[in-house]
Amino acid sequence: MSTVTDLRGTIQDLDREILNLMSQRQELVQDAKENHGLMMNFPFQQAIRYMDQQEVEMVATLLQERVQIRAKAKAKKVMYYSREYQQEDTIITINGERIGDGNPHFIMGPCAVESYDQTSIVAEKMAQQGVRLLRGGAFKPRTSPYDFQGLGVEGLQILSRVAREQGMAVITEILSVDQLDEALPYVDVVQIGSRNMHHFPLLKALGKTNKPILLKRGLSATIEEFKLAAEYILAEGNKNVILCERGIRTYETATRNTLDISAVPILKQETHLPVIVDVTHSAGRKDILTAMAKAALAVGADGVMAEVHPNPAKALSDSKQQMNLYEFDCFMDAIRKVIR
Ligand code: PEP
Ligand code: MN
């Protein structure tokens, strides 16, 4: 025979179950009211009296589903890159340029820093065009180990000297965590190249700095993977991330990569981060750069990156796709006509 204590325990368990069911029912009523306009004002006891066994089971199943959906929604992580986390656009100020403010910004310069003269000729031309964000590779991620690998720290020194002389900011790629200490003092914006988008230790290490980061989309990365690479940096505390679409690998051979133009409005919609488009590495040819840049700005890009070299035919990297100084002038003039 059960003791009084046993009975009390069982009654308490039942009370807890009833309370639980009541609260689940309350949620369901709320849902019925909010989403289906149903009026369900009668009390629970009355309602249950009119239900047959099948209806009671149905309500129980619905309640269970709802509880599961709620639990799933609660478990969903809100990503730092998302509009859910931050509704307003992130604006990153570099050398007085507010990237993400709704105006187009330009990042120009040679593919690789080859010498002081080569870099400063390009920068002078850029200054005449009012472009103040200077790119150039000192550590080059080349496909072949036998190709020019960049001047390394000497390249960074050239870049920062030229930038100082012309009142510009330096944007350059860093390839690995062990380069950070010696490279960071010369750099205003760290570029993470396409081949390094999945280099998670580098993303994490840069997430611990407060340098603006220009993160390029991986050669074969989906938009989802691209956003998650940005998340690696944001999650470490660095909120200054600029996303850069630079074309993806497809079966098309007319261009070096295929510019995924749809990525721009999707990234603008799904993230609050500035988005720029590198037309040079997307196209791999220079005859269509102006059209591509116009398209990028038309779909909402916050800026355009392109490569310029005083003598592209002699360039130590990407000789086919860099604009010469005259082509750069024509490019900027043509773009200005559509953005004014
Ligand atoms: C670059 O911009 O210098 C470069 C190497 O580009 P990507 O990483 O997009 O190939
Ligand atoms: Mn290049």
Image (tube, grey):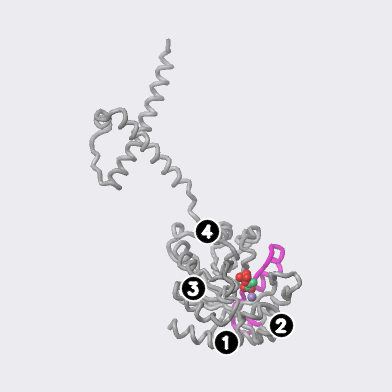
| Mark 4 or 1, nearer chain start | 4
Q: Where is residue 321 in the image (x, y as percent from the top left)?
A: 62, 79
SS at badge 2? loop
SS at badge 1? helix
Rounded to the nearest angstrom, the CA distance separating label 1 from label 3 is 22 Å
| Mark 4 or 3, nearer chain start | 4
Q: Which residue is drawn at 32% across and 38% down?
A: 26
Q: Residue at x 59, y 63 (%)?
A: 220
Q: For this rendering, which residue is in front, 72 or 43?
A: 72
Mark 1, residues whose alpha carbon is within 10 Å: few (<14), some, or many (≥20)?
Answer: some
Residue under pointer 3: 302
The yes-or-no answer for disc 2 within 8 Å of ligand 2 is: no
Labels 4 and 1 touching (C-beta < 8 A):
no
Mark 2, residues whose alpha carbon is within 10 Å: few (<14), some, or many (≥20)?
Answer: few
Residue under pointer 4: 224
Rendering quarter of residue 312: bottom right
Residue under pointer 2: 115
Q: What residue type is labelled 1?
A: Glu
Answer yes or no: is residue 194 visible. yes
In the rendering, which numbered label is found on residue 327? 1
Q: Where is residue 255 in the image (x, y as percent from the top left)?
A: 58, 74
Start-end of magenta stretch: 162-187
SS at badge 4? helix
Q: For this rendering, which residue is in front, 17 or 64?
A: 64
